[in-house]
Image: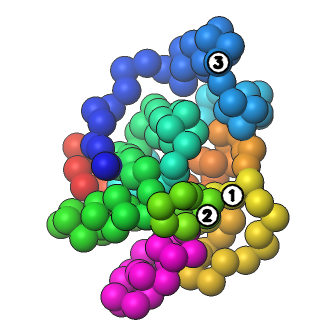
Amino acid sequence: MFSTRPQASVSGAALVNEVRASGQVSAFVRAMLAKSHEGAQGTKMGWILLVDDDVEVRETVAHLLRDEGYVVVEASDGHHALQAILTTPKRPSLVLLDLMMPKMRGEAFLEILRDIGLLHELEIVVVTAGMAKAVSGSRAILHKPFGLMELLDVVARYCAPATPGSRP
């Protein structure tokens, strides 16, 4: 299921401290937080569809992006991502797509978008822990683990600004 969770009221620094203190984080999140830089500026907004089956990764990335002023819709797999795209009146400005998911792999999601004629309408950045160098239908690849600044640079490159208060 996808969600339009409300904007987080916790700062990025508070999230970093909370996650580090819990001691129950994956190696990916630890590496991402270790590479993160505080002080990213700006209130650029845009609707981002974040597709990742790893709850911890998805929620951490969504929280960090929301903290930077982005509107984020989360999907746990390709089926829920398609549901979000097809049932939301406005297309996402950016899709951050994990390739390795159990129910529907990222490549299958891209193929369906191609088949129904939506692939050309979407900016898609593949997020993977694998060694992929290019994925047909995507604009870029973001390799896990990545830092906050790397994530924000990619998002800023492909995410069109939205008006404040906009919703998907």
Q: Is 28 in the magenta?
A: no
Q: Is residue 148 left or right of residue 68?
A: right
Residue 41 placed where, x, y %?
55, 36
- State the residue in front, 128 or 159: 128
- State the residue in front, 41 or 66: 66
Residue 167 placed where, x, y %?
23, 50
The residue to which callout 2 is attached is 99
Q: Amino acid at mark 2?
A: Leu
Q: Secondary structure at mark 2?
A: loop
The residue to which callout 1 is attached is 128
Callout 1–callout 3 Cβ contact below 8 Å? no
Residue 48 placed where, x, y %?
41, 55
Residue 59 placed where, x, y %?
48, 35
Q: Secondary structure at mark 3?
A: loop
Which SS does the magenta portion mostly show? helix
Of mark 3 and mark 2, the one earlier in the sequence is: 3
Q: Residues within 10 Å of mark 1 (few under 14, many from 20)?
A: many
Q: Is 111 in the magenta?
A: yes
Which range is magenta? 106-124
Above/below status of 69 relative to 144: above
Q: Residue at x 37, y 64 (%)?
A: 79
Of mark 1 and mark 3, the one earlier in the sequence is: 3
